[in-house]
Image (spheres, rainbow, N blue to C red):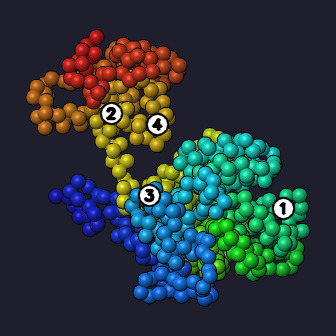
Amino acid sequence: MPAYTLPPVHGSSDQGTNPGSFANAPDVGGPLTFSSPDTPGMPAPSTKTAWDFLPVGWRRDPKTGHATAPAGFEPVTQLEHGRLGHITPEMRRVAEREGHVTPEQVRDEIAAGRLVIPANTVHRAGRLDPMGIGRALHTKVNANMGASPISSATDEEVEKLRWAERWYADTVMDLSTGGDLDATREAIIANAQVPIGTVPIYSMIIGRRIEDLDEVMILEGLEHQAKQGVDYMTVHAGVLQEHLGFVQRRLIGIVSRGGSLLAKWMIHHGKQNPMYTLWDDICEVLRRYDVTFSIGDGLRPGGLADATDTAQLAELETLGELTERAWRHGVQVMVEGPGHVPFDQVEYNMKLQRRLCHGAPFYVLGPLVTDIFPGYDHITSAIGATSAAYHGAAMLCYVTPKEHLGLPKREDVKQGCIAYRIAAHAADVALGIPGSRDRDDELTKARAALNWEKHFELSMDPDTARAFHDEDLDVDTDFCAMCGHDWCSVRISKEITQFLSGKEGSYAWDKPALSAALTAEQQAILEKRGVLSPEEIHRLASKTREHMGAAPGAKAGCHSDVASDEEAERLQSR
Ligand code: SF4
């Protein structure tokens, strides 16, 4: 008998646990949606939703649950349609892509402000394939890219966009600060199937000092990008004059580009942040094209020591106020979050945002959980991102190995996307999003069957998995080069199963089932592992492959899952 009895977990069975066994029970339509249990001391969800912040003249019909707008009102945004009870083609598409929610649920989550579909009316008419961001859906991943003044060009950025889409980015942000910003943005939107986000203040200060920025330039700059088809925009309206004093105690001050620029503007003019004072006008511009807000966290911490400090939390409170005001204008909202946060503080950060911003989707950068691994920040941040996604984030902004060091190139984009897809998927499984573990279970079955082809096919990066396998041993055997034949626990397990099940009548313990696929030559390869050069390994392994009868480029037929017993015996006895 086990000395310790597991606490009750929902959804567990004799076969093991189900996805989300230790998470809260799903609550789509309620404030929890898919959520982690609270560690003691965590803020409870807000009792309010976007329904509490209807525009003037709107009212909610308690019978239908939908809203009515003043006569003559024409809805534009997904939020307005959702409030009125409409199901748009974009809502249908999101439900279809997710698989576990209905179009009605998507509509209702949008109306509650817990879900956004960033789909500018202009981009919608182009190549955009609508997707949703919210806690009722799978966790999403954003990839940042953009030309800098010293590196990269428009063609390269479009190429990086395709590359990010190939590696599972759900949205892409064009953060260009150099080259022809307008042309790059236009080319990216024209080619993108995923929503495109920007930080419009970057292009507003090209060719001028931040101090010279005025209200007209801000509104014109936003309108211009909205007209181009940008799906969501980061606006750093939450950094207020009142917050700047808190920053002096920090180790690294303000690390957000937008935040630092606007702080400089406020100090120079002795006035409040213009993005804040213009907020209602900005909302009207974004509403016209259904651009979603990504309300920027200009005071996000830039190091562990500055995490969860007064500056960050004071700004978060303002982000809650801005969320409420944007909802009153019918604009969809997500809120941006940190940054650099020690692992133990991640949950609190997620749950505080959920309360102060009434469940508006949280879009976080990492967070990095340590500062001492430059060059590996896709890993340090993916650890924080996994925790963030489990505890409340709806979208994760990737970090590449180049973070803090240089502009990401193609391979860095891939590494960032993969690290973050792992983080998002791990959280989805832990949260119990239906179907999220199916592919893992299929791959486990393929692994147990030592079915390498299926193993590669189910891998998220099949080429890399195949290359790593084939580097040591490119013949399809009942083991791999990690442990070798005699130590392959999976092969031994398979033998035990065959023995116990009686499937193989002739099987007996005294007849060792040594695979003849392990030729003397192959044995030599394995013994010299770590000594031979990769080229030499390939040369020898390829010879082995030929020996097993595989045509160049084709699969060897000695595997027990693909060859009949007779055929396997014939091949192996050559
Ligand atoms: S040799 Fe080791 S790593 Fe490879 S399949 Fe067998 S148990 Fe797994």
**Would you name the residue on which mark 1 appears?**
205
**Would you name the residue on which mark 2 appears?**
451
Mark before the other along the chain sequence, 1 or 4: 1
Cα–Cα gap, marks 3 and 4: 26 Å
Q: Residue 462: which disc?
A: 4
Label 2 neighbour load within 10 Å: few <14, some 14-19, many 20+: many
**Would you name the residue on which mark 3 appears?**
96
| Nearest the eye: 386 or 55 | 55
- Residue 548: image location, x then y, percent: 34, 16
Res. 11 in view: yes
Cα–Cα gap, marks 4 and 2: 14 Å
Q: Amino acid at mark 3?
A: Glu
- Residue 188: image location, x then y, percent: 69, 50
Cα–Cα gap, marks 1 and 4: 43 Å
Which of discs 3 and 4 lies nearer the camera? The answer is: 3
Q: Amino acid at mark 1?
A: Ile
